[in-house]
Image (cartoon, rainbow, N blue to C red):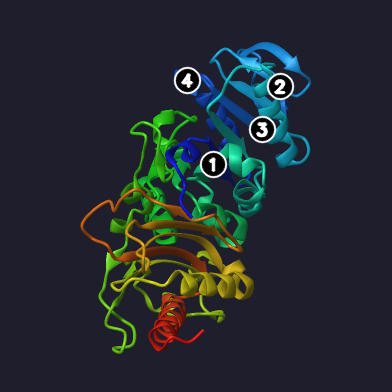
């Protein structure tokens, strides 16, 4: 179960996503001029979408060019897996310079989940690359309408580690504040940065993962950011005294309460009304078998509704905490961390879900854990 620091030091990978016209290309053009992009490989759909003329140093191959910023730009016209594999092979053979970071730009209509699945499950990629952050661009001028009418844009914002509100200079304060409120309700933990003409420091976008290369250690608190979820106490069954839910304050409204599988007559165009963000904690240690069983059941039956899951678990028989991470149907291999980040040793799991509230998740995991405890106490198999 354990992963070493060396394994965490795989090539950090950032996925840049966002709806059509939200400024991904402008953002990349700005990033590619910064010194902080040296030793970075950038994978884009087509070179023609990026203004490379002033950045191009030389063409290495039909699909790879070297840029003045010291980074590599690769056009991925086919499968992402083959593109990343080819890039790594060229690096190993010395055909291109060493790089320690990859940035991937998705298409505007892309569901980011398949890309994240690829990075988390492909046998070769998981040994060479690690997901560091998901950066989502949201058009400040048209973002609200896109959230209303395009569920892809809602999902892009919901799974983000960083949200960039682009074209911020083209809107008024009320429009920006209203959009920011919706984005915070969707994803309370993701910092939101107003951006004009793609101008943002690369340091604000990277190193959002569990492993922090600057300190050569795991930064659990920065990764989970459970402080972004307001605690409203235990709203579950009184028989469960060791469970507490943390909800985003913006979700403390009637239309966000336990709407598993049910649509609402009001605001039918607001796709984000179906998204929930919450954190569930367990005071008592969990059995690993119970958690694995729960994860298998939920990913098979409700995987589409589990947009993203992050957590740190206190497991029976384990001194060190275990970090877990999932995107819909796919759980990343668990990582046994060297130590607890604080004196708080409770299990904490952050969920971003669609049409799936905390009660069914909390109770199912609680009952499975209790059943395993009872089985172990009775000495039965």
Q: Secondary structure at mark 3?
A: strand
Return the x and y of residue 149 as percentages of the image width and height: 61, 61
Tell me what residue is drawn at x 27 percent, y 62 percent.
Answer: 345
1 or 2: mark nearer the eye: 1
Q: Which mark is residue 352?
A: none
Q: Quadrant of residue 359?
A: bottom left
Of residues 272 and 283, the one nearer the viewer is: 283
Q: Which mark is residue 130?
A: 1
1 or 3: mark nearer the eye: 1
4 or 1: mark nearer the eye: 1
Q: Which mark is residue 44?
A: 3
Tell me what residue is drawn at x 58 percent, y 44 percent.
Answer: 17
Q: Secondary structure at mark 2?
A: strand
| Image position of 12 (left or right of 75) | left
2 or 4: mark nearer the eye: 2
Please tell me how crowded label 3 is: few (under 14), some (14-19), or many (20+) other residues with Cα within 10 Å. Answer: many
Measured Cα–Cα span from mark 2 to mark 3:
10 Å
Q: Secondary structure at mark 1?
A: strand
Q: Earlier in the sequence, mark 1 or mark 3?
A: 3
Q: Earlier in the sequence, mark 2 or mark 4?
A: 4
Whether the residues at callouts 4 and 1 have beta carbons within 8 Å, the answer is no
Measured Cα–Cα span from mark 4 to mark 1:
23 Å
Q: Quadrant of residue 154?
A: bottom right
Whether the residues at callouts 1 and 3 have beta carbons within 8 Å, the answer is no
Q: Quadrant of residue 98?
A: top right
Whether the residues at callouts 2 and 4 have beta carbons within 8 Å, the answer is no
Residue corresponding to mark 4: 34
Tell me what residue is drawn at x 31 percent, y 81 percent.
Answer: 235
Residue corresponding to mark 2: 64
């Amino acid at each position: 179960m354990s992963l070493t620091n060396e394994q965490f030091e795989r090539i950090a990978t950032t996925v840049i996503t966002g709806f059509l016209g939200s400024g991904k290309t402008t953002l990349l053009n700005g990033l590619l001029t910064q010194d902080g992009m040296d030793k970075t490989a950038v994978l884009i759909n087509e070179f023609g979408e990026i203004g490379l003329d002033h950045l191009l140093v030389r063409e290495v191959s039909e699909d790879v060019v070297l840029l003045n910023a010291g980074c590599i730009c690769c056009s991925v016209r086919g499968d992402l897996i083959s593109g990343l594999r080819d890039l790594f092979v060229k690096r190993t053979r010395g055909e291109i310079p060493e790089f320690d970071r990859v940035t991937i730009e998705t298409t505007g209509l892309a569901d980011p989940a398949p890309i994240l699945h690829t990075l988390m499950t492909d046998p070769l990629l998981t040994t060479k690359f690690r997901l560091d952050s998901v950066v989502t661009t949201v058009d400040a001028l048209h973002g609200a309408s896109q959230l209303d009418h395009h569920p892809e844009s809602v999902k892009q914002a919901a799974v983000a580690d960083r949200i960039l509100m682009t074209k911020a200079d083209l809107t008024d304060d009320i429009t920006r504040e209203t959009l920011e409120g919706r984005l915070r309700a969707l994803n309370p933990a993701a910092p939101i940065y107003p951006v004009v003409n793609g101008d943002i420091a690369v340091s604000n976008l990277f190193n959002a993962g569990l492993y922090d290369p600057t300190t050569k250690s795991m930064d659990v608190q920065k990764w989970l950011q459970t402080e972004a979820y307001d605690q409203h106490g235990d709203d579950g069954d009184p028989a469960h005294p060791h469970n507490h839910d943390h909800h985003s304050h913006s979700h403390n409204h009637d239309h966000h309460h336990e709407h598993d599988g049910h649509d609402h007559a009001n605001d039918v165009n607001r796709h984000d009304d179906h998204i929930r963000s919450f954190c569930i904690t367990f005071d008592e240690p969990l059995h690993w078998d119970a958690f694995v069983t729960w994860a298998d059941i939920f990913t098979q039956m409700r995987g589409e509704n589990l947009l993203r899951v992050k957590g740190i678990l206190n497991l029976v028989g384990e001194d060190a905490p275990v970090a877990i991470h999932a995107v819909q149907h796919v759980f990343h291999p668990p990582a046994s961390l060297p130590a607890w980040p604080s004196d708080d040793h409770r299990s904490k799991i952050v969920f971003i879900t669609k049409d799936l509230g905390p009660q069914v998740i909390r109770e199912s995991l609680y009952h499975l854990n209790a059943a395993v405890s009872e089985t172990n106490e009775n000495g039965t198999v």
